[in-house]
Image: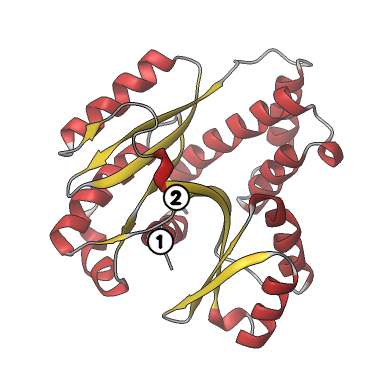
Amino acid sequence: MSGHSKWATIKRKKAKVDAQRGKIFTKLIREILTAAREGGGDQENNARLRTAVQTARENNMPYENIERAIKRGTGELDGVSYEAANFEGYAPGGIAILVTTLTDNRNRTSSEIRHLFTRHGGHMTEPNSVSYMFEKKGVIVVEGTQASEDKLYEIALDNGADDVRVESGTYEIVCAPEAFESLRMKLQEAKIAYQMAELSLYPKTAVKLDRDAAIKVLKLVSSLEDLDDVQHVAGNFDISDEILKTIDGELG
């Protein structure tokens, strides 16, 4: 299981307070609005919107919020227009970081991200300097208690999964973007709950971090994720479960 998937799963478990939920809703609304603007408001004919709405529902976003975001995207209601912008850089220890954003002010977002890189001992780089280290993938994380190994492998491999990785009783299913939605639906039909399901930039190779390096990298990643404009932060790091457990309290 990749280091970033472990971290993302921990973040979701902790994201139960209203303030954190509000941040999640902000990011999801931007994704729904942008998907509707670019592909229309019909979920049947807009796979990106369909995925965004499903993710919003899984995060308990009220139905009226979802509908309002779709209408703002299609122009039925007034709303802010967001553009996609990626920012690249290195965290301490040479860890490649790729930040995906939806922003209404690219200069502001760039300045905020640059400040955080510098503050946490990293630095921003030119476009395409680290993006080649990542590829877009669907990633679904399932606790081993939710299904037998045979059942999970059967569903995953019969529905387009590229790989199933097992670590500490947790399964990480990796698939091509075009297989993501159908694979997620098949798990739901089989009543197999998942901890995380997202389309994200997945590192082609990963660098193992010791405890000190892990703290530095995760402080940068966490601070970037807290920005409203940031939709996703990808990093090519790998952190053991043992280290993650010992540093959890030092990342606030």
Q: Which residue is mark 1?
A: 10
Q: Earlier in the sequence, mark 1 or mark 2?
A: 1
Horizontal placement of 232 versus 208: left or right? right
Horizontal placement of 139 versus 233: left or right? right
Q: Which mark is residue 17?
A: 2
Residue 251 % position (x, y): 24, 53
Looking at the rendered structure, the kind of residue marked 1 is Ile
Above or below, comparing residue 198 to residue 110 in the picture? below
Examine the rendering and report whether any part of residue 133 can be seen. yes
Q: Which mark is residue 82?
A: none
Residue 103 % position (x, y): 49, 22
Q: What secondary structure is found at the residue carrying circle 2?
A: loop
For the residues bearing labels 1 and 2, Cβ distance under 8 angstroms: no
Horizontal placement of 180 versus 136: left or right? right
Residue 106 % position (x, y): 43, 16
Q: Residue at x 22, y 57 (%)?
A: 214
Depth-wise, is mark 1 or mark 2 nearer the camera? 1
The one of 122 and 31 positioned closer to us in this rendering: 122
